[in-house]
Amino acid sequence: MADFVLGIDIGGTNTKFGLVDKKGKVSEEGSFPTHAKEKIEIFLAELKKATLPILENKSIVGVGVGAPNVNHFDGTIQQAANITWGDNVPLKKLIHDLFDLPVVLTNDANAAALGEMKYGGAQGMKDFVVFTLGTGLGSGFVVNGEIVHGHSGLAGEIGHVSVNPDGRYCGCGRRGCLETYVSATGIKKTVFKMMADYTRPSVLRDVSYNDMTAEMITKAARDHDYIAIKAFEYTGQIFGQKLADTVVHTSPEAIFLFGGLVNAGDYLLDPANYYMEKFMFKPFKKSVKLIPSSLMEKNAAVLGAAALGWEEFDIK
């Protein structure tokens, strides 16, 4: 019987999971709403219910989890901006008690970086960065072939660098964080800004804030909607400036972009790449590739969390 690691990717909106063998093949997978604004007990009950059918009669060696604001060293979620389960949630212990299996946790973007390194476009690379553009913005750094955790276990949270100290309020309690502009949530806010700034017609004017999604905005851009295109240009400009800053820190070979917002393709990538090069420190110009994840049709964070599990549990 084949052995599997249960890989889990906890996002601000949805949680995805899958059974992953040692070669990175996902045999069964699924998802459910994260219930990020409810009590964690609701999330745990849903996780158990959703995964139970795929765990039956399987040889599971452990659980790998990627989640926002995870302290890799102590297995807690610390003050996550988009998940209100508490300031210091002992998630590793809770999931261990739920499944009675070994558990390893890391930041969700770190998990995506591991997935990219083990199974995706970063195979063979030793220095790269992954940005995950979902409900919020996550980032994972790989330097000399190793994930950067830092002294606190929370290194690399580029989503919470400041774009404007007097800007949009962030779920973390600060103002002007990058993820309030560059994320599925951020671009919704930008669309409403653009609809206020411009009088041009747009299909998005008939959609309420709560009903609007990044997918709708992407579709509108593809249909040549002026407001949607301007929203992506604004998003790409802010992102590109911060990508240029990011490059200075670790001199990556490539920056990989993962998440639903990346499905906008050139509407996001073209302005992001343009402004990254425009604001780049001269020695780094034209030296860094900005490319979508090669795992877009899969789940890099699920694969990465599982890969971390295979490494941590040292299964031969």
Image (tube, rainbow, N blue to C red):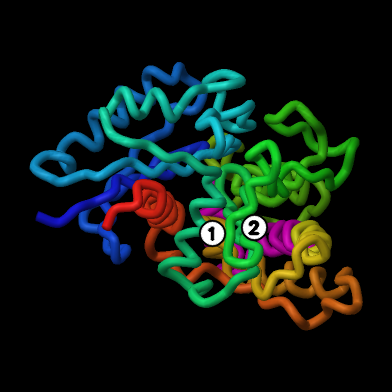
The quadrant where residue 15 appears: top left
Residue 277: image location, x then y, percent: 82, 75
The answer to whether residue 162 is left or right of residue 118 is right
Does the magenta portion include 91? Answer: no
Q: Are marks 1 and 2 in contact (CB under 8 Å)?
A: yes
Can see residue 230? no
Give the residue at mark 1: 113
The answer to whether residue 213 is left or right of residue 47 is right
Toward the viewer: 28 or 262?
A: 28
Can see residue 47? yes
Give the residue at mark 2: 141
Q: Main secondary structure of the magenta part?
A: helix
- Circle 2 residues within 10 Å: few <14, some 14–19, many ≥20: many
How many labels sit on residues? 2
Look at label 2 and name its amino acid: Phe
Identify which residue is drawn at 66% across, 59% down: 228
Q: Earlier in the sequence, mark 1 or mark 2?
A: 1
Look at label 1 and name its amino acid: Ala
Instruction: Specify start and end residues of the magenta stretch as a single range.
Output: 213-237
Does the magenta portion include 221? Answer: yes
Q: Secondary structure at mark 2?
A: strand
Toward the viewer: 102 or 163?
A: 102
**Which quarter of the image is occupied by the C terminus?**
bottom left
Q: Where 290 falls versus 237 (above or below)?
A: below
Residue 312: image location, x then y, percent: 40, 48
Residue 153: image location, x then y, percent: 63, 39
The quadrant where residue 268 appears: bottom right
Identify which residue is drawn at 80% across, 54% down: 198
**Could you give the CA–CA distance between mark 1 and mark 2, rounded to whole angstroms?**
7 Å
Residue 4: image location, x then y, percent: 23, 51
- Circle 1 residues within 10 Å: few <14, some 14–19, many ≥20: many
